[in-house]
């Protein structure tokens, strides 16, 4: 099972739960989708549209809440925290990479000066 998001022409994003169902006649799997609701563009949270237009409200499925009991908002915030940690780590690694590149340039210039001194001390002629 996975959650798939589709954006229509008016810019509204809808969320569906998609599962694959095997069709033995055609010997292929077919996607089966269940409508979950709209996706809030600011928070990324799925807003259920159940009960609108006179429809009776359905029982809440396990799809609305993950198995660990956290809401999608909490998962979204956790993912944002992980992203900020990753960005900070990447920035630290880039700074370290810059320092190492400076050291390599410095050592390279030292090697060149040593080579020049050796050539002066021991000319090939």
Image (cartoon, rainbow, N blue to C red):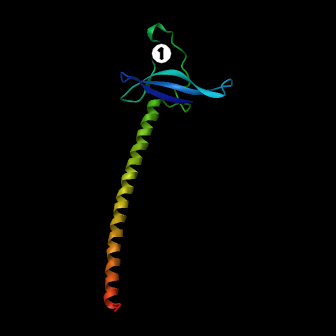
Quadrant where the N terminus sits is top right
Query: For the residue labelled by badge 1, is the local secondary structure a helix, a strand or a loop?
Result: loop
Q: Is residue 54 above or below residue 6?
A: above
Q: Residue 57, how many percent across, how many down?
A: 51, 12
Q: Residue 73, how many percent across, how many down?
A: 44, 31
Q: Which residue is mark 1?
A: 50
Q: Identify which residue is drawn at 68% across, 25% down.
A: 24
Q: Identify which residue is drawn at 45% across, 17% down.
A: 49
Quadrant of res 62: top right
Q: Residue 27, how many percent across, how many down?
A: 67, 28
Q: Identify which residue is drawn at 33% across, 78% down.
A: 112
Horizontal relation, residue 116 to residue 77: left or right: left
Give the camera-side residue of 103 and 78.
103
Quadrant of res 19: top right
Q: Which residue, as the protein is rendered here, is positioned at the far right?
A: 24
User: So how many labels did they put on this image?
Assistant: 1
Quadrant of res 30: top right
Q: Identify which residue is drawn at 44% across, 38% down.
A: 78
Q: Is residue 68 above or below residue 59?
A: below
């Amino acid at each position: 099972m996975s959650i798939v998001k589709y954006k229509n022409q008016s810019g509204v994003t809808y969320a569906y739960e998609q599962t694959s169902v095997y069709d033995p006649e055609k010997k292929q799997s077919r996607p089966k989708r269940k409508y979950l609701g709209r996706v809030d563009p600011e928070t990324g949270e799925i807003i259920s549209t159940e009960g609108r237009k006179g429809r009776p409200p359905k029982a809440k499925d396990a799809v609305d809440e993950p198995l660990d009991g956290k809401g999608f908002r909490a998962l979204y915030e956790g993912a944002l925290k992980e992203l900020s940690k990753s960005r900070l780590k990447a920035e630290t690694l880039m700074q370290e990479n810059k320092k190492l590149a400076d050291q390599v340039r410095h050592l390279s210039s030292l090697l060149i000066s040593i080579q020049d001194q050796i050539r002066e001390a021991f000319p090939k002629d």
